[in-house]
Image (tube, rainbow, N blue to C red):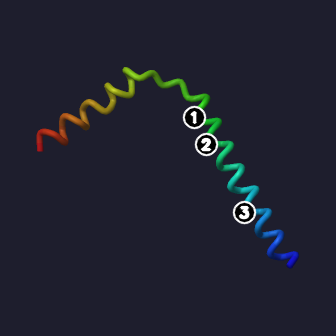
Amino acid sequence: MKFENLMLQTLFSACLLICVLTLGAMLTTHVSVPNVAASHAAVAAASSAG
């Protein structure tokens, strides 16, 4: 029982850490919309030409 408890607590801690790091990365990213659209424009043009 103790081993299962430890494994579940470790899994919960790892998942919580990943969620917090992902949320922090999303909130602190400074990418403007025109830059993102410009970087994807070449890919969109290449895929529609084929």
Residue placed under numbered mark 2 in the picture: 22
Badge 3 or badge 2: first in the primary sequence? 3
Q: Is residue 3 left or right of residue 47?
A: right
Mark 2 and mark 1: Cα distance apart in space: 6 Å
Task: Report which residue position mark 3 lands on.
Answer: 11
Q: Which element carries disc 3, helix, strand or loop?
A: helix
Query: Of the residues shown, which amino acid type is indicated by label 3?
Result: Leu
> Where does residue 5 sit, x and y in percent of width and height?
83, 71
Residue flagged by tag 1: what amino acid is it?
Answer: Met
Left or right? Give the position of 31 relative to 49.
Answer: right
* Residue 37 appears left or right of 19: left
The answer to whether mark 2 and mark 1 are in CB contact below 8 A is: yes
Q: Which mark is residue 13?
A: none
Q: Amino acid at mark 2?
A: Thr
Q: Earlier in the sequence, mark 1 or mark 3?
A: 3
Distance in Å between CA atoms under marks 3 and 2: 16 Å
Q: Residue at x 38, y 28 (%)?
A: 36
